[in-house]
Image (cartoon, rainbow, N blue to C red):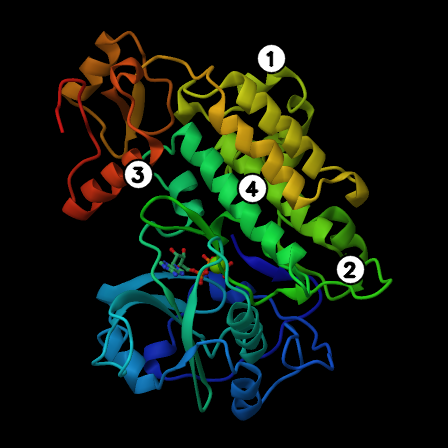
Amino acid sequence: MSKVSWWSLLPGCCGSDDHNRRSAKSANKPVEKQSSFSDISSSTTTGMLSPEDLSVSLVGSNLHVFTLAELKDATHGFSMCNFLGEGGFGPVYKGFIDEKVKPGLKAQPVAVKLLDLDGGQGHKEWQAEVLVLGRLRHPHLVKLIGYCCEDEQRLLVYEFMPRGSLENHLFKRYFAALPWLTRLKIAIGAAKGLGFLHDAEKPVIYRDFKASNILLDSDCKAKLSDFGLAKDGPEGDATHITTRVMGTHGYAAPEYIMTGHLTAKSDVYSFGVVLLELLTGRRCVDKARPGREQNLVEWAKPCLTDARKLSRIMDPTLDGQYSTMGAQKAAALVHQCLSQSPKRRPHMSAVVEALEPLLELEDLPSGPFVYVAPGAEHGDEEGEAKADGRESGRRHGHRHKLRSPKAGRLSDVALCREVGARLKRNSPLLQTQNETR
Ligand SMILES: Nc1ncnc2c1ncn2[C@@H]1O[C@H](COP(=O)(O)OP(=O)(O)OP(=O)(O)O)[C@@H](O)[C@H]1O
Ligand SMILES: [Mg+2]
């Protein structure tokens, strides 16, 4: 999903061969108007700072300043073997840092994000990211380890998130279906991260809450990433800030698109969209679907407060394995978050309070948990699934029992580990009922 600037795009400048990779994504990158803030040290979206001013404002942040050569070493020369993905900012590579890269560094895998110098984003987004993550730390925000600012090159070095983005897990065919409780945990984690930003001493509006910006660690713990569009919240008596309309189609709140008035409640709307994606397994905008289904919010909203209709829009890859009561409560919450009036949307702390008890609900169906086996087209497994009386009505592949809940259902975390271990081993995500661990 591409980000958009509704008003303008800035021209880019040329980069080196290594960094000249172009993608469809890079054609549509966000740019926003410069805004000025007086308090350099704590402001998120201050005007352009020189590298010297930036390092002064980051004193105490524990961020490491890397050279380009060090990060090249850490990523095998930004090798394609280390390529993790690419968004509006530029390509992301897996790397490894330790004492050899820089004395005093803890040995750890990292993700190195490199500004595409031909793209629509630039120093401003890079700086916003460094300033927000340099001053705010939270278990549900991705950790920024350091940065590089050399000539025109701008890089960011993050903790490595082994499971990549929620977007991949929800919408890419090669990932197994996310179990219900994992979806809830991800929603709760992301809500906590967002709530932390809103309640910070100097509140921050994230402005880019979406499935691709929610990263998952090895236990499927959710962390927010990408703070290039983040803005300091209104100060004093101000109810909102007025800013260029930026964000991603399908996630941005309607009043923000219409007026440019930005509040924390704009983020709450975006949270509602992501929670709806978690419930339905559908992208917020999907041009491949029939006309009236292309906009998820428009399509799903009438079903959110009607229990019977809700069951029709729940993600079919869940295969009914979810708490009905939990789904209804989550859907009611989505409905609230998507209120036209920002005032009627809940605060993020209320969202967390509403979601957490859903983990404890005991009306989870007792049928076996089944995986979608990505890419499996034919074979014995299909026969087995049919013999089990659970005909495949799924969009992708076939289903395979993992373990009967009554016989000791795996925790969601264990499920995540299982999927991860199998991905690492490159083995198929298949597990039959009798298979033992
Ligand atoms: N810290 C990280 N650890 C592991 N993978 C990461 C990390 N950060 C980013 N990635 C991977 O790199 C990909 C690109 O991320 P990036 O945030 O640049 O773009 P995006 O979120 O897909 O798009 P957008 O520019 O609209 O935010 C992600 O899909 C994710 O899989
Ligand atoms: Mg992103």
Q: How far apart are marks 1 and 3 (CA)?
A: 30 Å
Pointer 1 residue: 308
Q: Estimate how packed mark 1 is, as few (under 14), some (14 to 19) or many (20 or more) residues with alpha carbons within 10 Å.
A: few
Residue 199 x/y as whole percent: 66, 55
- Under tag 3, what secondary structure? helix
Q: Distance between the residues labelled 4 and 1?
A: 22 Å
* Amino acid of disc 4: Val
Residue 175 x/y as whole percent: 32, 39
Residue 292 x/y as whole percent: 63, 31
Please report whichever mark, 2 or 3, sits nearer to the chain's N-terminal start: 2
Pointer 2 residue: 260
Pointer 4 residue: 274
* Amino acid of disc 1: Arg
* Labels 1 and 3 touching (C-beta < 8 A): no
Q: How far apart are marks 2 and 1 (CA)?
A: 37 Å
Please report whichever mark, 2 or 4, sits nearer to the chain's N-terminal start: 2
Q: Which residue lies at the image location 87% right of the left edge and 62% below the top edge?
A: 237
